[in-house]
Amino acid sequence: MFEREDETVERVIQHLRRPVAIDPGLDARVMREIAQVAPAGRRVRPLWPLLAAAAVVATVLVARPRNRNAASQADTLQFVLVAPQAASVALVGDFNDWDPARSPMQTTHGGGIWATVVRLAPGRYRYAFLVNGVEWRADPNSPAAKDDEFGTPSSVITVGGRGGGGGS
Amino acid sequence: MGIHKVEPSDAELVRRVRAGDTGAYGALVSRYRDRLGRYAVHMIGDREDAEEALQDSFVRAYRSLARCDDPARFGAWLYGILVNRCRTTGARAARRRRMFVRDAQALDGAAHADQADRLDWTDAVDRALARLAPDYREAFLLKHVDDLEYEEIAELTGAGVSALKMRVKRAREQLQKYLREAEHV
Amino acid sequence: MILAALLLATQVALQDPRLDRLDPDTRSAVAAVVDSARVARLPIEPLIQRALEGATKGAPGPRIVTAVRRLAADLGTARTALGNDASAPELEAGVAALRAGATTQILANLRSVRRPLTVALSVLADLVASGVPADSAAAAVLALAPKARDADLVEFRRAVERDIALGAPPGAATSVRLNAGATDVTAASSGNPGTPTRRSRP
């Protein structure tokens, strides 16, 4: 009786000890947050040499509403790409005429976190990242644009206008 | 033989972060994310809330790194932050704790019988775990899943060792009871 | 008269400097599609953006023209389903939903229970892109559409995608999340001020 109980609990323990899949973008989100709150008075050196080794080649973080203008219902969205090896990154999409010169992304503290802010009215937009002027990358954390007719990956973001934003 | 990568210690990484090397913190995040993430997921039950708690804990730890008295024990200190964060999340997550595979309709979609069995067992364990009182669940996970010593758990939770032993014992008994009930459903 | 109007419209499209990024033949063909869409009172900006996407991605001219023509046709289908008062964003999202496999009847049904529809249609399309059968995705969005906020719909989509990534069959993940989330959506819609705001996710 007691042995059987122990076996059951032991089986539970072994089950619970199995690895749990954690969102691979979490590391990058943490790093982006702490980059914004770097303690005052500290010199921030280029980051990522270690994280880069452990992380996927590039992880796109967030397209996230920051605030809402009630009058226009437009959202200010920050797009972030983690690409430690990139020399340049541009955000291109339906909102900037797919022109790489319009939304060049900037590195945060020179550490491979590329970010730019775009203001978007409600709607569904296709977009992609252009790395080093030649390499197209979709956003792995946003829905893929399945109707890609030009042979390179794109993603989709939807900006909502009814209740709670809905930026995705 | 072969190439061996020497990992810097927690103390060394904490020292580098304090000196302004923000990137060193990325190594600490990578080092602890899976283990702490597993605790948060089992403790809270809702994966998204768990990841949010984990993310917050890493950020809080960074902000208060100056108060980490023993950098060599950064992991234990971080655990303490997460345990507290899970307690505050747990209360609101409990009402919407949900497991995605838990009804016959979902199981109909399983391709194979063994997959269905596995999902069934996962569901039963999740449900049993969810029924435990939070302090029982906390003690059980820290002791048996995260393999901490009672003294370490006492330090993290603020509870006495004897109380923790009792919680773990009760948790084991209740898990057994709940799983036995599930077998007969 | 109509011919004159068309010629005038064509001149307008050809004067759009953005189309200078296309080679002359492609530019003329795209301008013609854009002008036809303008006359039909369809949104033209999506057509221009699709052409510019092709240009930036280095696609051959004929492929760009085909993509723009197809989009114009689909915008027309979406408008037929959603009605003449549908906004440009709704029509674009409607195209995505149609291409994902939703029927025009589904679009019409959604229109009858919700305005604006942009996010609902987008979520439908994105669920299908994640592997959810089109009928299951449509049924789920139809069930949620009357009460859910846009943010709730997006959260629903994320939850389903996460479950799929963890191994759940897409159809089952959708139905289970739908059942599990029903009370959450209701609670969220009540606007309980004590509910902490969830950190938004990618």
Image (cartoon, rainbow, N blue to C red):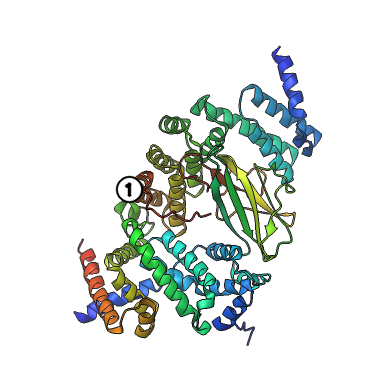
What residue occupies the far right of the structure in this picture? C24
Picture residue at 27% right of the left edge, 68% below the top: B132
Look at the image and tell me in which quarter the N terminus of chain C lies.
top right
- The picture places residue C142, in percent across and down from the top left corner, at 40, 38
**Does residue A44 appear to the left or right of B102 in the view shown?**
right
Q: Which element is circle 1 on?
A: helix
Q: Is residue A43 above or below residue C139?
A: below
Query: In terms of image quadrants, where is residue C88?
Result: top right
Q: Which residue is mark 1?
A: C183
Where residue B162 sits, quadrant-wise, is bottom left
Q: Residue furthest top?
A: C1
Amino acid type of the residue tagged 1 in the rendering: Thr
Towards the viewer: C33 or C156 = C156
Q: Position of residue A6 (x, y in %)?
A: 26, 79
Identify the subunit bearing mark 1: C
- Residue B113 makes an appearance in the image: no
Q: Describe residue B149's horizontal placement relative to residue C77 as left or right.
A: left
Q: Quadrant of residue C47?
A: top right
What residue is drawn where x is 38% and y is 44%?
C189
Reply above or below: B19 against A133.
below
